[in-house]
Amino acid sequence: MGVLHEVLEHNSHWVAERNRPLSKKSSKRVVIFTCMDTRLVDFLEPALGLKRGDAQMIKNAGATLVDPGGGVVRSLVVAIHGLGCEEVFVIGHTDCGMGQIDEEAMRRTMIERGVPSEAIEALHPSLHEWIGGFYNPSANVERVVGLLRTNALIPANVPIHGMMFDPASGQLKLLVEGYTPAGRVSEPPIEAARFR
Ligand code: ZN
């Protein structure tokens, strides 16, 4: 059995215990773009000193950016231009599952579960460019920060920081400091992430 009814049951009790309204705007005026990894749940936020209501959160597999006009950028546009966020944090993490997924094994699994191969081939960027292009998480963070920094939808005076997070220890490492134009604080990885 699934966990749906367990979730709904928990939610009804949980709501009954709370009645404190919070603003939908980030009280710290920050938006965080990070990975959907399970180990970051209820761990990344406290490690950053963030509480409920403090930050907008955007998550996907690997904190990857595959489309300059896609969902991630659109969410950032809303966070910045609609909800008053003034800083962007791009946070990758060590031991990221995106770097360990075998592209061909995933393709086989999808086919076995009835996903039409045309649907897989229609992915843009392709499965190979997307899954196969994720070499290492810190290179990805630097790449994403670079892409966002040159995205015309994000004002130049919005700092974009890049960081790596350790999902075991909770330690944060700064890769790119966004307050200055040349904010890189580490040597670029030899092995570069790429998508297109
Ligand atoms: Zn990850």
Image (cartoon, helix red, strand yellow):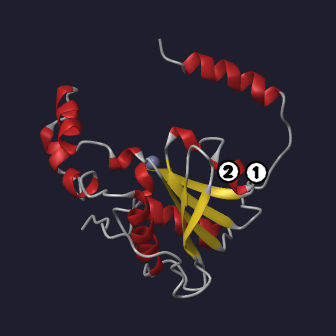
Type of amino acid at the residue the image marks with label 1: Lys
Q: Position of residue 70 (x, y in %)?
A: 39, 62
> Which of disc 2 and disc 1 is earlier in sequence?
2
What secondary structure is found at the residue carrying circle 1?
Answer: loop
Q: What residue does disc 2 label?
A: 45
Q: Position of residue 164 (x, y in %)?
A: 53, 60
The amino acid pointed to by label 2 is: Glu
Q: Residue at x 45, y 56 (%)?
A: 63
Mark 1 residue crowding within 10 angstroms, few (<14) / some (14–19) / many (20+): few
62 left or right of 57 in image: left
Give residue 110's quadrant in the image.
Answer: top left
Number of labels in the image equals 2
Rendering quarter of residue 163: bottom right
The alpha-carbon separation of the residues under discs 1 and 2 comes to: 7 Å
Q: Which structural element holds mark 2?
A: helix
Residue 81 x/y as whole percent? 61, 73
Residue 30, horizontal then vertical, whole percent: 67, 66
**Which numbered tag is attached to residue 51?**
1
